[in-house]
Image (spheres, rainbow, N blue to C red):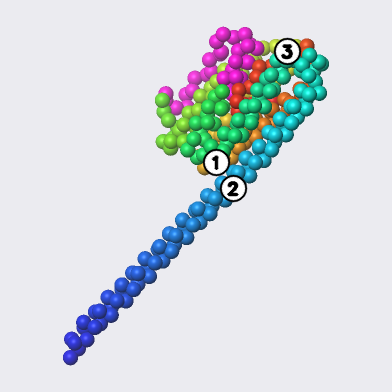
Amino acid sequence: MHYGRAPWIVALGMAVATAGACSSEVARDTTATADVTANADRAAELQRERDQDIAKLTERVAEIERGYQQQTAERPRGTAGATPGLREEVQEDVKNVRQAVADLKTTNADNWWERHEQAMSRTADDVEADVRRLSGARELPAPRADTTAPSGEVASSAPFTSRRDRFVKELRTRIESWDKALEKVSARAARETELDDVRARVRKLDDDLDRLDKASADDWWDVTRARVADYIDRVEKSVARLDDNPASTAPRRGATPNDTTRK
């Protein structure tokens, strides 16, 4: 008598189980959809923030260009003020800083490190050229040997972290050799000012490395934006000082694009 109910009970149990499975599947689908939507919203918000940063930097560059045009209009070539060579250097910087901001529009998480590394390497080459010129050294002093790790050892297996660590280590080695070369240099008057300027650029580059050493791949936009903002600061000061440089002052070497270390 009881066996006649078994098929019905089994069928009911299967129906309940099926309904429960369907409910769980719907819940998982709903959660997944919500996660995708949240991620998309967050990505869109970050892009809006980056666009706002670019707009602000673009406006700063426009102000610099207006300032440069005003300076050159008020003090045309052949009058007192900056030498023609210095004017041309500042003009080149104004053009380069405009391009640096434009490049931000195509900078992303995939290509930022290559661009950042290239920009800092160009800056380092420029600084080293000035160190060699001021010190008169054909060969820079060799830095002390690194005994903290065997030769060829990679600091981390993480792709970005290992590249960053190698770059920071190599550049710090170069900075150490620059410091040794500059220790022996003495100068007076305008040359002393230039020497102080180069030493300040070396320290600025060293500070940039300290910040980079603590950065992660997720910090790509903050690191990139800071580099370009520093470059804008430098060019802004150069334009403001155009009429503070008498014609008798020797022009300084121009900066490379995205140079963030020259004051």
- 10 Å neighbourhood of mark 2: few (<14), some, or many (≥20)? few
Q: Amino acid at mark 3?
A: Ala
State whether residue 176 appears in this view.
no
Q: Distance of mark 2 from mark 1, alpha carbons?
A: 16 Å
Circle nearer the N terminus (3, 2): 2
Q: Which residue is mark 3?
A: 250
Q: Distance of mark 3 from mark 2, alpha carbons?
A: 45 Å
- 10 Å neighbourhood of mark 1: few (<14), some, or many (≥20)? few
Q: Which residue is mark 1?
A: 219
> Nearer the observer, disc 3 or disc 2?
2
Pointers 2 and 1 in contact (C-beta within 8 Å): no
Q: Quadrant of residue 214?
A: top right
Q: Which residues are magenta?
A: 123-151
The picture places residue 64, in percent across and down from the top left corner, at 72, 31
In what element is the residue under mark 3? loop
- Going 57% across and 51% down the picture, which residue do you hit? 45
- Going 60% across and 44% down the picture, which residue do you hit? 51
The picture places residue 148, in percent across and down from the top left corner, at 47, 27
> Nearer the observer, disc 2 or disc 1?
2
Quadrant showing the C terminus: top right
- Residue 239 lies within the magenta run: no
